[in-house]
């Protein structure tokens, strides 16, 4: 299919790209921009591994066309650290051992960020509910919950 010229704003930078109109945002960030933090696991909207933020809200990038994301503010996990200082959620995930294979981690952290941005002091149940679309096969979820709780208290 004929490529289309699009402009995407990712992690504060603008990129002009020629992409096939059916290409997903996940494919474009990984293959065209080299931002491989977002993962493809199910590819069908079931697992949350491909989560990125669009205008601060979590979306499944495997189900979103790149052309639909034009004019919006896209944040991937690579955009969270500031001057190589990790985001408090990233630090907490490391400190609490909330990462094993890491396949779910970028989606989990970005979704957690959107939860905390909306409600800086969520309850454990609110975090659990907010993260229910993000599957993790390794950690048993407790460490992830502890890490998000710790980040919400400002522990650094
Ligand atoms: S890869 Fe997108 S939801 Fe699983
Ligand atoms: S750490 Fe492996 S899937 Fe979550």
Image (tube, rainbow, N blue to C red):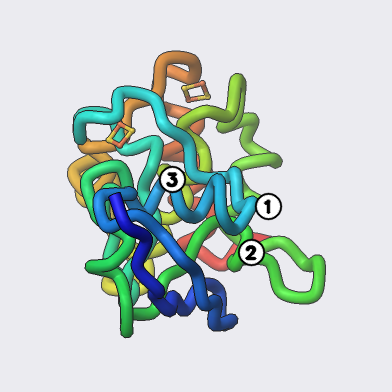
Residue 91, disc: 1
**Which one is in front, 61 or 7?**
7
Residue at 39% over, 79% down: 73
Residue 91 appears at what percent x and percent y?
68, 52
Q: Secondary structure at mark 1?
A: helix
Q: Earlier in the sequence, mark 3 or mark 2?
A: 3
**Which one is in front, 98 or 8?**
8
State left or right for residue 22 relative to residue 20: left
Q: Earlier in the sequence, mark 1 or mark 3?
A: 3
State left or right for residue 21 relative to residue 53: left
The Cα atoms of the two marked residues, 1 and 3, are separated by: 27 Å
Residue 80 appears at what percent x and percent y?
60, 66
- Badge 3 crowding class, 10 Å Cα cut-off, few under 14, some 14 to 19, many 20 or more, is many
Q: Do the residues under discs 3 and 2 have CB atoms within 8 angstroms?
A: no
Q: Which residue is the site of mark 3?
A: 27
Residue farthest toward the right in the current orientation of the protein: 84
Q: Do the residues under discs 1 and 2 have CB atoms within 8 angstroms?
A: yes
Q: Which residue is the site of mark 2?
A: 87
Residue 142 appears at what percent x and percent y?
42, 27
């Amino acid at each position: 299919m004929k490529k289309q010229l699009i402009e995407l704003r990712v992690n504060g930078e603008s990129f002009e790209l020629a992409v096939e109109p059916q290409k997903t945002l996940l494919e474009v960030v990984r293959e065209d921009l080299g931002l491989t933090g977002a993962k493809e696991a199910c590819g069908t909207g079931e697992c949350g591994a491909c989560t990125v933020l669009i205008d601060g809200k979590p979306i499944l990038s495997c189900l979103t066309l790149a052309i639909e994301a034009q004019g919006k503010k896209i944040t991937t996990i690579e955009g969270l650290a500031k001057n190589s200082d990790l985001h408090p959620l990233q630090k907490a995930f490391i400190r609490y051992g909330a990462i094993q294979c890491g396949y779910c981690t970028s989606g989990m952290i970005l979704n957690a960020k959107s939860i905390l941005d909306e409600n800086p002091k969520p309850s454990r149940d609110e975090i659990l509910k907010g993260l229910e679309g993000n599957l993790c096969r390794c950690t048993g979820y407790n460490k992830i919950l502890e890490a998000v709780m710790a980040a919400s208290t400002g522990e650094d």
